[in-house]
Structure formats: structure tokens, C-alpha cells
Image (cartoon, helix red, strand yellow):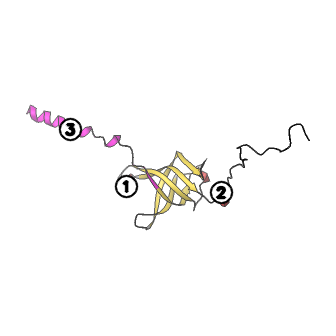
């Protein structure tokens, strides 16, 4: 009887020491087009092509710390527009019906002519252009 109790204790102890909870989520990158952005409810969706080339819609969520980069510059979530070309980095949180996709980073690739936040013009030396007149001469 002691042997059976000891064996059950050992089996239950091993089962309770699973590394499942310690694993970090699998992070993926998906390229597509921004379709729906609801900042109030932290709900977003995009259209992308799966491995077979079939167009699919993917819904997910964003967090306060979701990083947004537009044409290489850090921006805000509200700067993303529907129909922007995006690359979303994220992971699946939860399982079954309660599972949701969480975006950790959203990169936007926008044509320069439609990018309303232009980078400031810089001279070749990296400073604003200065006058070509020598100092002290009008």
C-alpha cells in the first residue's frame, strides 16, 4: 500500500511540474493589408494570403505597448490607416474559443507621396542648411 501511495505521489508530482506554462508564445510575422482598426475596443483585423494563396481575414487585439513603425519611424496606433500595407508581429494568447491573436508590433509600409508625416529636410552634414555667406559679412 505504501508503494502505491508513493508511486501516485511521484506521478502527480511529475505531472504538476510541466514546462508548458513556462514556454514563451510562438511569435509570427504576417504581411497583409489593414482592414479594420478599432482603438476604443483594441480590436484590429487584416487581410492576408495563407500558404495556399487564399485570401483570409485575421482578427486580433492590440495592447498599450504595441509598437507602431511607419516607414521606419515610431508612430502611434491611431496613425495606422485602413488599406495600409502592414507587417504584424504577434502571438496567440490562450487556447480554444478564448484564444486571441495579440499584435506586439505593426510595421506600415506606405508610399512616400501618401505619407503625411514627412521627415524634416536635412543637409548632407545632417544639420539644417546654413547660409553660404562668411561670418561677419552682409
Q: Looking at the image, which is closer to me, 57 or 132?
A: 132
Tell which of 31 and 93 is nearer to you: 31
Q: Which residue appears farthest toward the front when viewing the image?
A: 134
Quadrant showing the C terminus: top right
- In the rendered image, is residue 41 in sight? no
Q: Which residue is drawn at the image coordinates 65% and 58% (left, top)?
A: 112
Instruction: Please tell me the numbered disc located at residue 63.
Output: none
> What span is in magenta?
1-29
User: Given contact means CB atoms under 8 Å apart, are the residues at marks 3 and 2 in contact?
Assistant: no
- Answer left or right for 130 relative to 85: right
The quadrant of the image that shows the N terminus is top left
Q: Which label belongs to residue 97?
A: 1
Does the stretch in magenta take in 89? no
Magenta: main secondary structure equals helix
Q: Which mark is residue 115?
A: 2
Horizontally, is 20 left or right of 36 in the view?
Answer: left
Disc 1 and disc 3: Cα gap in Å?
Answer: 28 Å
Q: Which residue is mark 3?
A: 12
Amino acid at each position: 500500500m505504501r508503494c502505491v501511495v508513493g508511486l501516485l505521489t511521484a506521478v502527480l508530482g511529475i505531472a504538476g511540474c510541466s514546462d508548458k506554462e513556462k514556454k514563451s508564445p510562438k511569435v509570427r510575422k504576417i504581411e497583409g493589408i489593414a482592414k479594420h482598426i478599432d482603438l476604443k475596443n483594441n480590436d484590429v483585423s487584416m487581410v492576408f494570403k495563407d500558404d495556399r494563396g487564399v485570401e483570409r481575414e485575421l482578427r486580433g487585439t492590440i495592447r498599450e505597448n504595441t509598437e507602431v513603425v511607419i516607414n521606419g519611424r515610431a508612430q502611434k496606433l491611431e496613425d495606422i490607416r485602413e488599406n495600409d500595407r502592414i507587417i504584424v508581429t504577434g502571438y496567440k494568447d490562450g487556447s480554444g474559443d478564448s484564444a486571441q491573436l495579440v499584435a506586439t508590433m505593426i510595421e506600415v509600409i506606405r508610399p512616400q507621396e501618401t505619407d503625411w508625416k514627412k521627415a524634416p529636410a536635412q543637409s548632407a552634414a545632417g544639420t539644417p542648411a546654413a547660409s553660404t555667406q562668411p561670418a561677419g559679412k552682409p
